Image (cartoon, grey):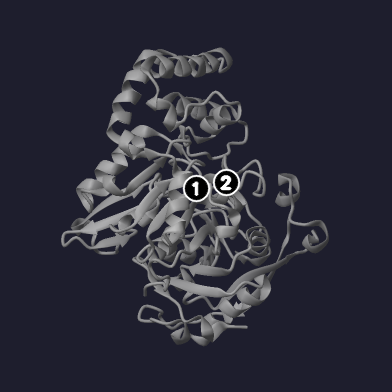
Amino acid sequence: MVVPIPSRSGGCSVVVGAQWGNEGKGKLVHELCKTADVCARFNGGANNVHTVSVDSSGRIFIGRPAGSKNDCKTIVLRLFPLGVVNKKCKVVFGNGMVIHLPTLLNEIESIQSSFDPHVMDRIYISSRAHIVFDFHQVVDTMFEELRENRLGTSQKGIGPAYSTKTIRNGLRMGDLFSSDSVVKEKITELVTYFTRFSLSEAITGSVIDPDKILSEHMRMFSKIRHRVVETVALLDKFQKDKLSIVCEGSNSVMSDLDFGTYPYVTSSNTTPGSASIGLGIPPTRITKVLGVCKSYTSRPQHWFPSILSETDPAATQLVSRGHEFGTTGGKPRKVGWLDLVQVKYSAEISGFDSLFITKLDALTGLAQIGLVTGYANYNVSENGFPSTVEKFDSIKPVVEYLPGWTDSLQNVTRISDLPENAKLFLKFIETFTNVPVEFVQIGVPQTVLTDRDIIRK
């Protein structure tokens, strides 16, 4: 079902994950962008994972549709927001991003060969977005290997690129418009910094050769230079022309550099406020904030309060039916009951206008469904959400159980058609977080249900 955001409405919606990532943000972005004019990404680098499948008849699916693997061409987008799937939707790469040019060009080529040969005509890249070089990726891997407690970074060079941004010797897309001598001088300065302070034999050879870096990047830049623009003025014009904009963020609230479970976080701010900073859109022009939340909790590597044992039958079901396997390595994610204390914390930071609950069908068949409603040994109301990993790791969750349902959700087309216990589950989420559940997603490929009246407070 198409989410009712009319084209030319002039609205600006921000979509963020309410947990630790992999909530299914792309599914909501895809639905919104079926009618939106612009999709803009405001943070991160090649650490998003959007899987897009195109079958032999040209139909596009988000994810990998069951039973169609041999009939589908699948591409993984790490830099592009999912608004690109709508061929009428403009795509903006914001100033808050860090961009690895080889990855960007590979994604452009994949999109051109899969479903839109003219995609280049509708993308706009901020001249203020920073560049991720290959040596950023080498350093990223080196730093991760030096840690006693691994962070689990994507090792895409994102953290080191943001570090050079903050110490003010990074290169931005707009810098490549300068003469070769000026660009080489800036690259050489950055290279000198890494070779002098990295103290590693890993930073040697062609990966750190300024002349080679210059020639390769100027060659790549020549392919996209006509799409690199000053996006603040561009987005201002879009809004004055009453174009509807959907802002997509990478990662999630709990991965936010300031508000997440530090240090196991990403290298940028991920909350809705960073949409304003990462795109140059005034906060007063953001008209709606949507949080995306699974019907349970998952996390790729690290512990969380509601985690279930891998041998627990409920965990086995959630991993299997929720397709909780890493996109790159295929390793099962850790899963557990939905932590409403954590989601409420995300809502307080983000100011969600509504929630989008994903993978509701993964719960079907469970006799009872757990929800974390408090922490037995930590008073969040008095102390706020734990700000150190030591406090967080000591949490003992209070779990309440609701009755499950056995009815299949496969043919459900409206929220009002859900089993009564499924509606009770959604109502419980609303009441606890004080945020209305507006959309529900079922299945792979997904079906998005709305009709929010039936769960209105």
As drawn, 450 above or below 174: below
Is residue 236 visible in the rendered image? The answer is yes
How many residues crowd around disc 1 within 10 Å: few (fewer than 14), some, or many (20 or more)? many
Residue ID at (29%, 59%) = 88
Q: Which of labels 1 and 2 is toward the front?
A: 2
Q: Which residue is mark 2?
A: 277
Q: Position of residue 195 (x, y in %)?
A: 52, 14
Residue 208 in view in this figure: no
How crowded pointer 2 is (Cα within 10 Å; few <14, some 14-19, many 20+) is rated as: some
Q: Residue extending furthest right?
A: 382
Residue at 41%, 79% (x, y): give it. Answer: 409
Q: Amino acid at mark 2?
A: Ile
Residue 220 shown left or right of residue 113 in the figure? right
Residue 141 position within the rendered picture, expressed as x and y whole percent measured from the top left: 49, 29
Label 1 or label 2, whichever comes before in sequence order: 1
Instruction: Give the residue at mark 1.
Output: 42
Residue 447: percent from left, percent from top = 37, 72
Q: Secondary structure at mark 1?
A: loop
Find out whether the residues at labels 1 and 2 contact each other: C-beta distance under 8 Å.
yes
Is the residue 257 above or below the residue 272 in the image?
A: above
Measured along the vertical axis of the image, is residue 155 above or below residue 448? Answer: above
User: Along the line of sight, which residue is nearer the eye, 87 or 320?
Assistant: 87
